[in-house]
Image (cartoon, rainbow, N blue to C red):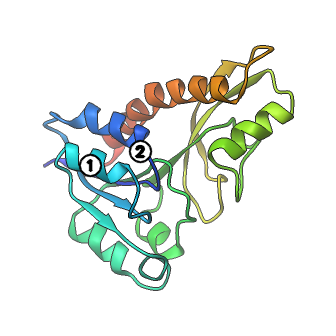
Amino acid sequence: MKKRIAIFASGSGSNAQKIMELFKHSPEVEIALVLTNNPEAYVLQRADNFEIPSHIFDRKEFYESDQIVELLKNLDIDLIVLAGFLWLIPKNLIAEYPGRIINIHPALLPKFGGKGMYGDYVHKAVLAAGETEGGITIHYVDEKYDEGQIIHQAKYRIDKGDNLEMIKFKGQQLEHQHYPRVVETILKKIQK
């Protein structure tokens, strides 16, 4: 029986695509659903390209009902992967999937994490702080932004003269390299 993933994303979904690519022909893993809070998100096109169903939801459905939890349970989801998803995960979802929701953050947590720290905001803060290295953190999700147990970190060097685009590129290269592999490793530990 295949292990099933649901991917949550709010934007472009480049990490989601790397995960879709990895499992496209897998006999053991299926990406069952892509969910987004943004009807304009490019991740919907990526899901469509891979013939993966998608679901668009609003704040009310996410925070004031059990509809998302029920949808995921009905699909027999084993792991929830956040790939650039910007909303805090509600308690009912965390309670239903303890230790089975993971996220990727574009900095070396615990530095540069928390509410409002995503995307370019993180990279600008890293540059402003004069850091000599940046990186990514893959972590479990709990009820607070970016505070769940760290699963994996990877670093890159920030050279003098590196600008926002350069460190974004370095970080994204690491994300694309590590996130699919870590997802695969975690799935192997989940008992069906």
Which SS class for mark 1? helix
Mark 1 to mark 2 CA distance (whole Å): 9 Å
Answer whether labels 1 and 2 touch (C-beta < 8 Å). yes
Question: Upstream in the sequence, badge 1 or badge 2?
Answer: 2
On the image, the x and y values in percent for residue 48 come to 22, 50
Residue designated by label 2 = 13
Q: Is residue 47 above or below residue 142?
A: above
> Which disc, if any, is residue 47?
1
| Residue placed most toward the observer, 77 or 6 | 6
Residue in the foreground of this view, choosing between 162 and 130: 162
Residue 103 placement, left or right of 8? right
State whether residue 157 is above or below residue 52: above
The residue positioned 70% from the left and 57% from the top of the image is: 116
Three-letter amino acid code at disc 2? Answer: Gly
Give the residue type at disc 1. Ala
Residue beneath the point at 20% across and 51% down: 52
Specify whether 103 is left or right of 161: left
Of 112 and 166, nearer the camera is 166
Q: Position of residue 163 (x, y in %)?
A: 73, 24
Label 2 crowd bin: few (<14), some (14–19), many (20+), radius 10 Å:
many
At a point 36% along the width and 49% down the height, the residue shown is: 43
